[in-house]
Amino acid sequence: MNRRRDFAVRTVLGMILGGVLVGCETYGKADWKARLGHYTWDQAIEELGPPESEARTSDGSRVADWILSRSRTYSTAVRGPLFWSWSGQDITTTAENHLLLTFDAQGRLKAWKRIYK
């Protein structure tokens, strides 16, 4: 009986560890500077999915915007000087994290920018 339980525990821990290790590789941490000149539009669509918006320029370049993380609002209670007293709440809003990629007419990455709105 203990063998079965040990096996189950090891399996679950292995799956959790594997998920953490796989989850650490995200496009938010990509080295965009190293991708300049050879990363393509098709690779971007495959990796990031369809962009939130895109536009073509007069020279044939394509500028696309991906939202990496949405804005969030957090609310925390603020206690007063006494344990049971309440003095209000503190509200915090995070910025949206955008990735702006510019591709040349041949579809190769020529510029990138991270924007927080």
Image: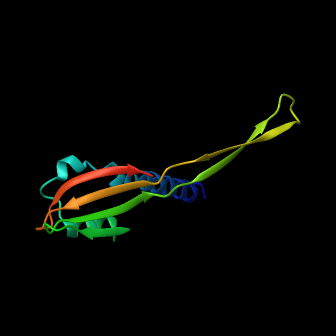
Q: How many marks?
A: 0
Q: Image height check: is 53 above or below 90?
A: below
Q: Is residue 33 left or right of residue 21?
A: left
In the picture, the quarter occupied by the N terminus is bottom right
Q: Position of residue 4 (x, y in %)?
A: 55, 59
Q: Residue at x 31, y 57 (%)?
A: 100
State the residue at coordinates (37%, 50%).
115
How are the colours assigned in the image? rainbow
Horizontal and vertical percent position of residue 80: 82, 32
Q: Residue 76 in the image: x percent, y percent?
A: 70, 44
Q: Nearer the viewer, residue 25 or 61?
A: 61
Q: What residue is drawn where x is 24% and y is 50%? A: 32
Residue most extreme to the top: 81
Residue sticking out furthest to the front: 58
Q: Is residue 106 above or below residue 31?
A: below
Q: Is residue 7 left or right of residue 80?
A: left
Position of 37 with respect to 47 (left or right) is: left
Nearest to the observer: residue 109 or residue 63: 63
The answer to which of 91 and 34 lies nearer the viewer is 91
Asked whether residue 26 is in view, the answer is no
Q: Is residue 108 visible?
A: yes
In depth, the one of 5 and 50 nearer the eye is: 50
x and y percent of residue 69 in the render?
45, 56
